[in-house]
Image (cartoon, rainbow, N blue to C red):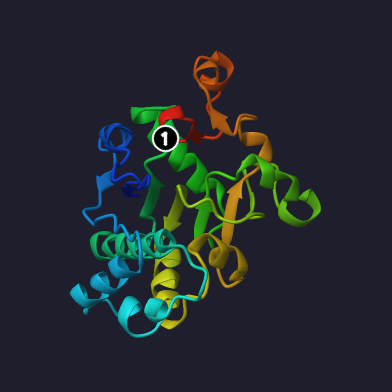
């Protein structure tokens, strides 16, 4: 199995990006995974969207169906998220050669609490714990969504993984090849909602998530939480968490 990855920069509204954290994530993942070269597409307003369309006429999912006419009420950034994720998955499919290959898509506001071989083993463990039909693995469910987990509905084993039970938290998602193929087919036919909502509502996807008990009970990292040895040394607590940066709030 080869792991591919892409870290998408998060636009903060003031023209800056979380470059330093993205660089740190890239340095960690590059030790064992292949970085995708697709770019993060930043759509800040309607003008950005139409300029992107005009300059990328080869992208069918933007210019024919898909995002041709985003529904009213969409935020510009939600369009950029769709385009960025689809382009990364398209490159993943072009570069990977085995059905067992996976693609880890992250945004730059996550924090990796493991490094090197420990991180690689954790990702491999998660992948092997999913059923063979898996399309995506949701690596982080926000704390205020975890009450939706119902063991009678979402649990299928006593392991790490359950059926996905909440909207996909886009900053941390692992894709299989078959899931990436489904995404490209869907994008060329009909995109009707922001990516996290559409994945949750589209039951053609076989989506899975980490069980709530394997999440830390901290939804936003603080300096105190980062120094908590119990969290730091627990190998199967949630690997990817929102990191609270006061300057970015």
60 relative position to 105: left or right: left
Most extreme residue toward the bottom is 64
- Left or right of 154 on screen, residue 168: left
Q: Secondary structure at mark 1?
A: helix
Visible residue check, residue 110: yes
Vertical comparison of 161 with 29: above or below: below
Judge left or right: residue 45 versus residue 27: right
Percent across and percent down for residue 242 are: 50, 36
Q: Where is residue 12, by image quadrant?
A: top left
Q: Give the x, y percent position of residue 87.
A: 30, 64
Residue found 42% across the figure and 35% down from its top: 248
The count of marks equals 1
Query: Observer-nearest residue: 238 or 67?
Result: 67
At a point 38% along the width and 81% down the height, the residue shown is 68
User: In the rendered image, which residue does mark 1 sit on?
Assistant: 248
**Residue placed at 42% from the left, 80% from the top?**
69
The one nearer the camera, 8 or 182, is 8
Q: Position of residue 124 (x, y in %)?
A: 44, 42
Q: Report whether residue 236 is seen.
A: no
Q: Quick check: 223 left or right of 67?
A: right
* Label 1: few (<14), some (14–19) or many (≥20) C-alpha neighbours in 10 Å: few
At which x and y percent is residue 179? 45, 65
Relative height, residue 217 to residue 8 (above, below):
above
Q: Name, please, the residue furthest toward the right.
A: 152
């Amino acid at each position: 199995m080869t792991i591919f990855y892409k870290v998408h920069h998060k636009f903060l509204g003031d023209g800056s990006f979380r470059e330093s954290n993205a660089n740190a994530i890239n340095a960690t993942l590059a030790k064992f995974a292949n970085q995708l070269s697709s770019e993060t597409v930043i759509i800040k307003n309607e003008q950005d969207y139409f300029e992107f369309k005009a300059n990328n006429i080869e992208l069918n999912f933007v210019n024919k169906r898909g995002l041709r006419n985003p529904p009213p009420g969409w935020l510009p950034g939600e369009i950029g998220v769709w385009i960025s994720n689809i382009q990364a998955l398209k490159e993943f499919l072009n570069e990977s050669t085995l059905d067992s290959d996976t693609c880890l898509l992250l945004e730059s506001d996550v924090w990796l609490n493991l490094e090197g071989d420990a991180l690689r083993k954790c990702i491999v463990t998660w992948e092997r714990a999913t059923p063979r039909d898996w399309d995506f693995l949701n690596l982080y469910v926000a704390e205020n969504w975890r009450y939706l987990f119902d063991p009678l509905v979402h649990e299928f084993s006593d392991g790490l993984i359950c059926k996905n039970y909440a909207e996909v938290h886009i900053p941390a998602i692992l894709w299989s090849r078959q899931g990436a193929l489904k995404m490209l087919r869907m994008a060329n036919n009909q995109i009707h909602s922001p990516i996290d909502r559409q994945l949750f509502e589209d039951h053609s996807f076989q989506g899975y998530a980490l069980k709530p008990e394997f999440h830390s009970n901290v939804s936003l990292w603080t300096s105190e939480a980062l120094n908590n040895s119990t969290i730091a040394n627990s190998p199967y607590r949630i690997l990817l968490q929102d990191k609270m940066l006061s300057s970015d709030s």
